[in-house]
Amino acid sequence: MILKRKDNTFVIDGEFGPYHVIEEDPIYQDVLDRLNSGEQWEWDISPSPGEGYEWNETTWQWEESLVLVKTRLNKACDKHLESVILQSGFPWGEHTIRCDAVSQQNATGFMTAIAAGINPFPIVWRTIENVNISFSDVTEFQPFAEAMMGFINQKFQEKWSAKDTIAAAETEEEANQIYQDYIGG
């Protein structure tokens, strides 16, 4: 229920917490007009959409808390790495090599086989451009596998740095800008 006070401000009395003051401000003119009309009515503020949302006194809306914004952006960083960066791959000569989970497993598997004395050669690798690259021995394949793993490690470090910087952000705008910088936006 909304109550008008003697000083012409209003308070909200209800189950959702402490009194909230509505200043006489044009943004609330519709509410103020209805209150001043003497009409009896109750105004139900929507319940919180869930944990991590805060009530904004200025806009009278539930908004994501900074913690929830940071959590959402950190998950977005993870997804961007997996679905965009590693799928887009790294340059190898004139080609681009996908670095998704399957590619990583294949490279690791071949290097493990080589280390165990198993000869997996020739190894044929398909590029993003659908061109087959053939490796005939370890001297050809090892630099390729090292370049792939180096690229992946570098991209994970960039993601971790972005996530750490997002965690240290003091405002939603700052956190969003860090994320945009990370994805190249």
Image (spheres, rainbow, N blue to C red):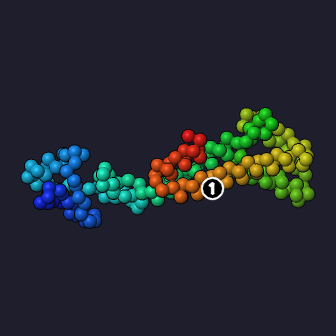
Position of 185 with respect to 5 (left or right) is right
- Number of numbered discs visible in the structure rendering: 1
Identity of the residue drawn at 14% across and 49% down = 34
Q: Position of residue 38 (x, y in %)?
A: 8, 52
Position of 144 with respect to 139 (left or right) is left
Quadrant assignment for the C terminus: top right
Give the camera-side residue of 93 and 171.
Answer: 171
| Residue 140 seen | yes
Q: Which residue is mark 1?
A: 160
Give the residue furthest to the left. Answer: 38
Identity of the residue drawn at 46% across and 59% down = 67
Give the residue furthest to the front. Answer: 7
Identity of the residue drawn at 81% across and 50% down = 146
Q: Position of residue 17 (x, y in %)?
A: 28, 65
Q: Position of residue 179 (x, y in %)?
A: 55, 48
Position of 70 with respect to 105 (left or right) is left
Q: Position of residue 153 (x, y in %)?
A: 72, 53
| Residue 28 seen | no
Question: What crowding class fits label 1: few (fewer than 14 Cα within 10 Å), some (14-19), or many (20 or more)?
Answer: some
Quadrant assignment for the N terminus: bottom left
Identity of the residue drawn at 91% across and 57% down = 117
In terms of secondary structure, where does tag 1 sit?
Answer: helix
The amino acid sitting under disc 1 is Trp
